């Protein structure tokens, strides 16, 4: 074979299953040859980068080959004047950001663990972070992808400029496809100039009601935070940010701001007025290296590396504060709760053994449905995935996704049973 073949290690294990072989293609052409070989031999293939998200999804029904893309690295094309970059799928986000920063630009997504998270994995899992509050999700920045299909053919979708779609935008079907439709070997992004300044303001609250009042006022104001992260007391301890907070309360709300110095100063003044009106405790604005460190800690906490269970909940933002309170009551005071509060996204991290908590988890899932929300079990022990609805409450879109999978992967060899 023209690509490297290795024996599997624990790094390729997914939900207790190991592949027979690990294939390490170094070029796009080798990826195509690898998939053509797998297609001909009817081998089940799961694409991997550095494995930061391999715990996501259902256990695979078959797993013959781990297709490791970590050698598929580098910038293909970068046009700073046009704010466009094309990057290979095995490149880490940190490597891409470093190149962009040299020209005063950045890709405005902040998923956990960017030093290890690869571009292909980020697109395939649609993983974002706190700053989606201002900048949006992966979809908003993705212009195009180059994909190796399950039969080895290479297809490009989208283009190199912002306005490139006439008709159906097939690029977006690969965002959040979890490696089930094709192998992402390149991605085209629009990038942005780096903000002049970045500041975070930390506030403390004794109860969720005052946070809810503040967020309601914030939504109807002209204030535009880059992120609005709500953390319970346990999350603050585990993220190790207590020394940065104004006071130790039941909840902490951290607002980050990106922009010009004048507008950020105005936003900070307005936030302090709103916070004072509802009784939140306000700290000093955090800037410089301390602010960057705080952002990194909160961002990476959403990855849940040390947790046994990570539950991602999507709710109407108006239901978020009440749900956070309910979740803590049902699961106990020792669970860690973090939320993108203005986006209606909550992550619940449970570090202790789960055997005695399944009834409480089931009750919590019922609460999510009652609040017109949904969930995704991002991480759980394999034996519990069999008892939990990992992908949440089924929607009518699932049937469409099944037809799409059957059309693009006729032999069902890509990440079988991981998603649909």
Image: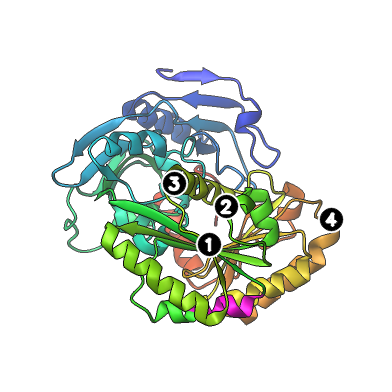
**Residue 211: in magenta span:** yes
Disc 1 target residue? 283
Of discs 2 and 4, which sits in the foreground?
A: 2
Q: Quadrant of residue 186?
A: top left
Please report the residue visible at 66 percent of the width from the left and 29 percent of the height from the top: 10
The residue segment tinted magenta is: 207-215
Q: Dot 4: few (<14), some (14–19), or many (≥20) neighbours within 10 Å?
A: few
| Image marks 1 and 2: residues in contact by CB distance under 8 Å | yes
**Residue 12: in magenta span:** no
Of discs 1 and 3, which sits in the foreground?
A: 1
Foreground pick, 290 / 87: 290
Disc 2 target residue? 244
Q: Quadrant of the N terminus?
A: top left
Foreground pick, 377 / 303: 303
Residue 118 picture location, percent across and down = 44, 38
User: In the visual, does 318 lie left or right of 237?
Assistant: left
In the rendered structure, which disc, 3 or 4, sits on the residue that comes first in sequence? Answer: 3
The CA span between labels 2 and 4 is 35 Å
Please report the residue visible at 51 percent of the width from the left and 82 percent of the height from the top: 277
Disc 3 target residue? 122
Disc 4 target residue? 355
Residue 257 higher or lower than 149, as above or below: below
| Element assignment for label 4 | helix
């Amino acid at each position: 074979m023209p690509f490297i073949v290795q024996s599997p290690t624990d790094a390729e294990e997914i939900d207790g299953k190991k592949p027979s072989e690990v294939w390490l293609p170094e070029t796009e052409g080798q990826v195509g040859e690898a998939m053509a070989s797998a297609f001909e031999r009817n081998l089940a293939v799961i694409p991997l980068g550095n494995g930061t998200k391999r715990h996501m999804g259902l256990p695979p029904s078959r797993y013959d080959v781990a297709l490791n893309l970590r050698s598929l690295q580098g910038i293909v094309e970068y046009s700073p004047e046009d704010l466009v970059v094309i990057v290979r799928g095995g490149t880490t986000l940190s490597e891409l950001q470093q190149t962009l920063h040299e020209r005063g630009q950045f890709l405005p997504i902040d998923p956990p663990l960017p030093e290890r998270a690869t571009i292909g994995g980020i697109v395939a899992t649609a993983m974002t972070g706190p700053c989606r509050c201002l900048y949006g999700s992966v979809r908003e920045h993705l212009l195009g992808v180059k994909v190796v299909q399950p039969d080895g053919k290479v297809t490009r979708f989208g283009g190199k400029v912002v306005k490139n779609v006439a008709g159906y935008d097939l690029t977006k079907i690969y965002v959040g496809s979890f490696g089930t439709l094709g192998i992402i070997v390149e991605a085209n992004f629009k990038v942005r100039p780096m903000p002049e300044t970045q500041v975070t303001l930390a506030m403390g609250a004794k109860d969720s009601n005052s946070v809810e009042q503040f967020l309601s006022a914030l939504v109807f104001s002209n204030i535009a935070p880059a992120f609005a992260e709500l953390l319970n007391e346990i999350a603050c301890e585990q993220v190790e940010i207590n020394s940065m907070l104004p006071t130790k309360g039941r909840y902490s709300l951290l607002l980050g701001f990106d922009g010009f110095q004048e507008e950020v100063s105005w936003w900070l003044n307005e936030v302090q007025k709103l916070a004072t009106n509802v009784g939140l405790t306000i700290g000093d604005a955090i800037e410089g290296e301390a602010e960057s460190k705080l952002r990194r800690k909160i961002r990476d906490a959403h990855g849940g590396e040390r947790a046994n269970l990570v539950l991602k909940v999507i709710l109407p933002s108006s239901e978020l504060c009440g749900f956070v309170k309910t979740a803590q009551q049902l699961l106990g005071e020792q669970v860690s709760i973090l939320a993108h509060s203005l986006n209606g996204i909550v992550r619940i991290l449970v570090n202790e053994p789960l055997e005695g908590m399944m009834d409480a988890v089931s009750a919590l899932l019922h609460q999510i449905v009652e609040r017109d929300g949904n969930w995704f079990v991002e991480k759980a022990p394999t034996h519990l995935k069999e008892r939990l609805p990992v992908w949440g409450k089924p929607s009518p879109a699932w049937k469409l996704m099944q037809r799409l999978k059957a059309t693009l992967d006729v032999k069902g060899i890509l990440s079988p049973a991981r998603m649909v």
